[in-house]
Amino acid sequence: MKTNKSYRFTPLLMAISVIVGVVIGTFYANHFSGNRLNIINSGSNRLNNLLHIIDDQYVDEVNIDSLVDMAIPQILSDLDPHSVYISAADVQKTQDDLKGSFSGIGVEFIIRQDTIHVQNVIKNGPAQQAGILAGDKIVSVDDKPFVGKIVTNEEAMRRLKGAKGTKVKVGVKRYGSNAVKYFTITRADIPQKSITAVYMLDDNTGYIKIKNFGENTYPELLVALAQLSQEGFGNLVIDLRDNTGGYLESAVQMINEFLPKNKLIVYTQGRKSPRQDYKSDGRGSYQKIPLVVLINEASASASEIFAGAIQDNDRGTIIGRRSFGKGLVQKQMEFPDGSLIRLTTARYYTPSGRCIQKPYTAGDNVDYEEDLLARYQHGEFFSQDSIKHTGPAYHTGIGRTVYGGGGITPDIFVPEDTIGMTSYLKEATMSGLILQFAFTYTDDNRVKLNTYKEMMELADYLKKQNLVEQFATFANKNGLQRRNLLIKKSHRLLDRYINSRIIYNMLDEDAWTQYINKDDNVVNAALNVFRNGSAFPKKPEQKQAAKKK
């Protein structure tokens, strides 16, 4: 009996021996067999294992988070041009424009000579309520000087933006005084408008400029349409030029306002994403109004969905230049640290079945990023015949030919206006000297300019001030040599650009848009379409018959 009792512990001793053997074996394998670990066993774990090895054994200390921030974008860029990684620090900044609001003090500023200059103060915003005026220079934030090389856009945003209800103390210098005035501002939600201009182009034509497709763009559209209805509009221009896109849902809601029931707006489809159709529900209030949509090479994504749905359903006329060509759908996925990726999971297809995504080579984004420059050099901005259609032909509901594989080609092409374009004008624009002059002139003459509250009266006043000559003198002192013949040739464009920026500084983006639209060739082409009664596209054979008559 005594001997039998001693055998009770034998299984336990054997188990312990096995565990010890595994631990020792793993130790020696890890330290003396080339550090292979499990890297060869699973491809999906290689990156994670590599980071552990670097963190554990690399000769110098490494910030692994920073290494990941550099590695993930490279991995995603090898997939397609629009799958991206956004670090936690940049997430808020990238989403503010589309969220409809952000929390801050409510000023628009520029940085000149290492100092924040308040360009505009948002009406009824926290800064205005605290007493901040356009033209003020912010020289301190929370009792700490904020001037010099430290002043960057990123640092200014970091210090001035903040959670709703929090306070920030700013010190400002006001025009005509060296004394510093102090204001305590309580941060609040600052609305971000997607629709930046709403007005009547003529007695019968309404105009709506849409900057992007955010969370509140559809309600903003309804308000804009109601405003134009009160002014008696019978035609409508929707300007999507330079609109880089936004939320698909907003675009679908807006298109629905203009289409009859059960019309396909767009559909998406991918390898792991079954086809999903988006159709109109017939509840739109503006299904029969003559409609023109304006686009250009910077109109992308949701803008192209909007234009494509109107074009393929023969609902209106598209005018301008070929759009950007982004037809990839990104799904947003967040990591625990707050960073996120936008991964392409499907493609957009217009009602005729065309994908508007322009060609790209996975892992090589250089040609893709330089596509617009290539189009310009090829002459596409100046001649419709220079447009290269890389995709097959499709047909709209009434049989009109449209093309996929590279953006939306407009029904009416309007070339870029090059009359008066010179090397002097290009340098004046690209150097930022026009913006600097416009702000300096605004600041120096703010008291007088404040007496003009309407765009037209301010424009008439500026026209008499010989600002091109004043600019030429300013530019010459700041490194741009005066060239009288080129200045004379570009006088109209210089005057237009300078005046528009001063109008923007003194009034708002709506007034600025109205001013530049006065002699805009694309807007004029839209008005001609309405005058000719041709906003609704006709069948190809009807066009031929009209020509024979």
Image: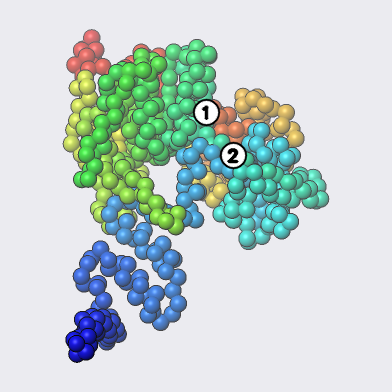
Q: How is the image coloured?
A: rainbow
The residues tagged by marks 1 and 2 sit, at their Cα atoms, a distance apart of: 21 Å
Q: Nearer the viewer, residue 476 or 177?
A: 177
Q: Which residue appears farthest toward the bottom when viewing the image?
A: 3
**Kind of residue indicated by mark 2:** Asp
Which residue occupies 37% across, 49% down? 333
158 in relation to 286, above or below: below
Where does residue 136 sit, x and y in percent of width and height?
Answer: 71, 45
Q: Secondary structure at mark 2?
A: strand
Where does residue 256 sit, x and y in percent of width and height?
Answer: 35, 23
Q: Nearer the viewer, residue 26 or 88?
A: 26
368 in relation to 58, above or below: above
Q: Which mark is residue 159?
A: none
Pointer 1 residue: 197
Where does residue 39 sit, x and y in percent of width and height?
Answer: 25, 72
327 in relation to 394, above or below: below
Q: Quadrant of the C terminus?
A: top left
Q: Are the residues flagged by discs 1 and 2 in contact, CB closer than 8 Å?
A: no
Mark toward the viewer: 1 or 2: 2
Q: Is residue 530 visible?
A: no
Task: Describe residue 209's horizontal placement relative to residue 401 as left or right.
Answer: right
**Kind of residue indicated by mark 1:** Ala
Q: Which mark is residue 189?
A: 2
Where does residue 338 sit, x and y in percent of width and height?
Answer: 45, 54
Which residue occupies 40% across, 32% down? 250
Q: Nearer the viewer, residue 324 or 283?
A: 283
